[in-house]
Amino acid sequence: KFTEDNLSRFAAKQGGLGDCWFVASISSLAGNKKFLNRVVCHDNSFDEKYAGIFHFRFWKFGDWVDVVIDDRLPVKEDSNKLAYMSSSKGKEFWTPLLEKAYAKFRGGYQNIGDGGLIEIAFQNFTGGVTETHDLSEPPDSAIKFFRTKINKNALIGAAVMEDKSNSDQLPSGHAYTITGATKYKTTPLVRVRNPWGNKTEWRGAWSDNSDEWKKVPENFKKTVNFDVKDDGEFWMSYRDFIKNFQEVTMCNLS
């Protein structure tokens, strides 16, 4: 299937390319259906009038550029498993096809597979304007700031710089997506997703199985869509967030 259900932020799972910055940007894009539907064209399907081609769009120098690709994807030499990006839903292919289209747009897989800047992907997805914040000097009223940006459909990414993580639970030199922000009593909380998917979540305070969530009323959990799943997405306190992350990038849309 091109997609099994809908285009979910949990679908993108990084493969053998070093393009976590791009995979993280897809998770953020999936939260904005307007731009997601502009990038991932509605006529893509394996079922209706299938001709072995797929159609995507990216923003470049003030215009939307059409990119058409065929249906061939790189696989590992010793198996039929995809070599690069895959979907957390095994039979859907919109994410690796989007990665291939973006690689073509940038001149080849080699041009996206050795690190990059999440703000560039944000711009190519939306044409929006990016801003980057150094978390050594975090914004005032940070959670209110994040929530305002999220409510305005901004795309938000975060980075743990090389050899800068204060925890062995979060890989360094890696890009993440901010998917939510809230406050419980006096504790500001941030929801983050690791593009590696399962088995890659924060295990400290406010993580999925932490003691903190056991003391939270069920109605609050429903309000913030709290769910215990090994999907790469997790909550953490803002205090722990700024201890482990060094940079936040936002793409503002108009």
Image (cartoon, rainbow, N blue to C red):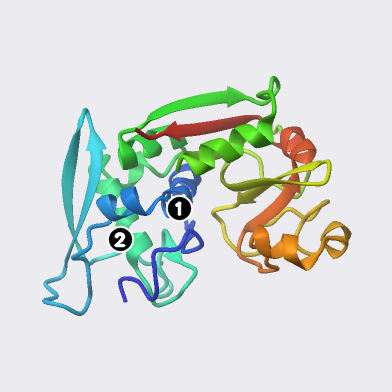
- Amino acid carrying mark 2 in the image: Leu
Q: Mark 2 or 1 closer to N-term? A: 1
Q: The disc labelled 1 sits on which kind of residue?
A: Gly
Q: Residues within 10 Å of mark 2 (few under 14, many from 20)?
A: many
Pick whichever, 243 or 34, lies toward us: 34
Looking at the image, the residue that sits furthest to the front is 219
Residue 218's disc number = none
Specify the quadrant of the image occupied by residue 83.
bottom left
Whole-percent x, y for residue 244 in the image: 73, 37
The image position of residue 15, as x and y in percent, is 47, 58
Task: Determine the image quadrant of residue 209.
Answer: bottom right
Q: Which mark is residue 97?
A: 2
To which residue does mark 1 refer? Answer: 31
Q: Is residue 238 above or below residue 201?
A: above
Callout 1: SS: loop
Q: Is residue 122 left or right of residue 41?
A: right
Quarter of the figure with residue 123: top left
Quadrant occupied by the N terminus: bottom left
Residue 75 appears at what percent x and percent y? 36, 67
Question: Which element is circle 2 on?
Answer: helix
**Is 79 situated above or below 34?**
below
Mark 1 crowd level (few <14, some 14–19, many ≥20, 10 Å Cα): some
Query: For the point 70% across and 68% down, which residue is it?
Result: 228
Q: Is residue 47 above or below residue 219?
A: below
Instruction: Please state which of residues 195 and 140 is positioned toward the viewer in this rendering.
Output: 140
Closer-to-camera residue (150/19): 150
- Tag nearer the camera, 2 or 1: 1
- Residue displayed at 29% across by 55% down: 37
Query: Can you say which quadrant of the picture contains the C terminus?
Result: top left
Residue 107 seen in the figure: no
Image location (x, y in percent) of residue 130: 43, 28
